[in-house]
């Protein structure tokens, strides 16, 4: 029997058992969490669900129900993290730029800097106080 199924509850504790016949919701949630972790493998949804069905020995209908729950968790997670995503992306960009410079991969560093500048709104070239203006006029033949 795997370790995860033999968890003991300390005596005097009012906490319910995590696994077992008396608490099937916890078993279902643990199964759904395994599918949630597995989705990061990059497989398409259908393949994920079919693999999940085979691994967990459940029906395909149950597998798709688990997938709907995982989709709901994804949506909730995105809503929770939306506010902090820009700062996380910026820190990743800075990290990529730093690592690419250290490894002398300057083309990647340039691309990272361009993206960083575009996000910051300073992607236009700085020419100075006097910018060059070209004015072309076409006159009719006389």
Image: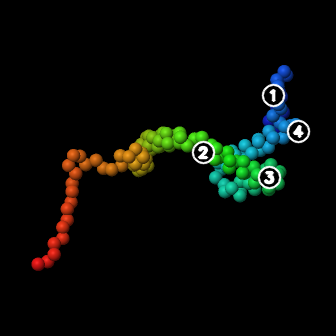
**Residue position marked by numbered label 1 in the rendering:** 15
Label 3: few (<14), some or many (≥20) within 10 Å? Answer: some
Of residues 42 and 88, the one nearer the viewer is 88
Q: Which residue is mark 4?
A: 21
Q: Residue furthest right?
A: 21
Q: Label 3 belongs to which residue?
A: 62
Q: Earlier in the sequence, mark 3 or mark 4?
A: 4
Instruction: Measure how far apart labels 3 and 1 are at the Cα level.
Output: 28 Å
State if disc 3 and disc 2 touch (CB < 8 Å): no
As helix, strand or loop, the secondary structure at mark 2 comes to helix
Quarter of the view holding residue 44:
bottom right
Tell which of 109 and 73 is nearer to you: 73
**Mark 3 / mark 1, whichever is N-terminal:** 1
Secondary element at image label 4: loop
Question: Considering only order in the chain, which callout, 4 or 2, is on the residue closer to the N terminus?
Answer: 4
Q: Are marks 4 and 1 in contact (CB under 8 Å)?
A: no
Marks 2 and 1 sit apart, C-alpha to C-alpha, by: 31 Å
* Label pair 2/1, CB-CB below 8 angstroms: no
Can you identify the residue that label 2 sits on? Answer: 78
Give how far across and how far down residue 118 sits, in percent.
40, 48
């Amino acid at each position: 029997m795997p370790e995860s199924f033999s968890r003991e509850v300390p005596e005097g504790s009012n906490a319910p058992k995590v696994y077992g016949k008396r608490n099937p919701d916890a078993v279902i949630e643990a199964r759904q969490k395994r599918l949630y972790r597995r989705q990061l493998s990059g497989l398409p949804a259908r393949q994920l669900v079919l693999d999940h069905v085979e691994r967990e020995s459940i029906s395909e209908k149950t597998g798709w129900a688990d997938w709907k729950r995982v989709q709901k968790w994804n949506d909730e997670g995105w809503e929770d993290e939306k506010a902090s995503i820009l700062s996380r992306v910026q820190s990743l960009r800075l990290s990529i730029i730093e690592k690419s410079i250290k490894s002398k991969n300057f083309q990647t560093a340039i691309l990272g800097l361009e993206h960083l500048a575009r996000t910051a709104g300073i992607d236009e070239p700085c020419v100075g106080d006097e910018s060059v203006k070209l004015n072309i006029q076409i006159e009719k033949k006389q």
